[in-house]
Amino acid sequence: MAAVDSKHQIVLDAKAYGQGQEHDLLEPMIEGVKAIFAKAPASSQEATKQAKVTADSGYHNRKSVEYIEEEGIDAYLADTGFRSRDPRFKDYDKHKPKERLKPKERFTQDEFTLDTKAKSCRCPASHMMWLKAEKAKIDPSYFISFQGYEKTCGECSLRKRCLRKERQTTPRQFNVKLSATEGSKNDALARMREKIDSEQGRHIYSQRLGTVEPVFGHITDAMGIKRFTLRGKKKVDGQWKLMMALHNLLKIHRYGWCWE
Ligand code: SF4
């Protein structure tokens, strides 16, 4: 992992944690940066208090979002649904090879005829579905839930486009979001979603890609370091820090000492 500044792409802190999942690593990374800046002049410490933090959905979980709030950090953490809520990415996969579109070839919500007042639903094959739950709570939202009948779904010629798997033995379930749950309206995750979905949030988060990814590109492609040559967490961590130090030295060498 690496924490990178957006202005000069200098790595502020780096550590190899030796684990595949990143969910719980945001807090130690931020604390690591804080510890480094604790030794810096007061003006630099002040600047870090105003810094904005962006991190991808790999770091998003309740614990990290609550930590961010408690610490008063102005952070923008994407969740896994962030792109799908962003209208700018509506057609993002239209140029992908056809076979990768298969999950999206399932019937969409618009192809079901729903009447929330009458609490009824007709599936794309024009069969009535039965009301499974009027208000099911699947945090952070309430849903109205319908299900197809075993017999009709079992014999349906449209199963391939309707069910997750063609061989699925359970009938189609269809959930429609009604509203956010009461708890979620006052919830750290909901607040983060609202923040990152705002125009300003999307703009700030969009800088993440051009900040951190070029550092990895620089190390692997420009400097030609494509793999670790040592084994063991401690040695790999040391090698990772060396790579980052090398990246920083090259940046400083090119900028000189006159940057702001
Ligand atoms: S699989 Fe079931 S729910 Fe889906 S279209 Fe066929 S009958 Fe309707």
Image (tube, rainbow, N blue to C red):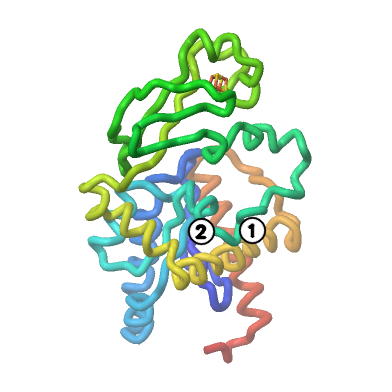
Which residue occupies the foreground of this view, 57 or 169?
169
View extreme (front): residue: 118
The residue at the point 63 percent across, 37 percent down is 104
The residue at the point 61 percent across, 15 percent down is 156
Kindly identify the amino acid type of the residue bearing the numbered disc 1: Phe
The answer to the question of whether label 1 and label 2 lie on touching residues, with beta carbons closer than 8 A, is: yes
Determine which residue is flagged by label 1: 216
Kindly identify the amino acid type of the residue bearing the numbered disc 2: Ala
The residue at the point 58 percent across, 38 percent down is 231
Give the numbered dot on residue 2: 2
Which residue occupies the foreground of this view, 147 or 120?
120
Q: So how many labels did they put on this image? A: 2
Does 65 sit above or below residue 199?
above
Residue 230 placed where, x, y %? 61, 42
**Which quadrant holds residue 43?**
bottom left
Q: Secondary structure at mark 1?
A: helix
Dot 2 crowding, Cα within 10 Å, few <14, some 14–19, many 20+: some
Report the image quarter containing ligand 1.
Answer: top right
> Rounded to the nearest whole Å, what is the CA distance between mark 1 and mark 2?
9 Å
**Label 1 vs 2, first from the N-terminus:** 2
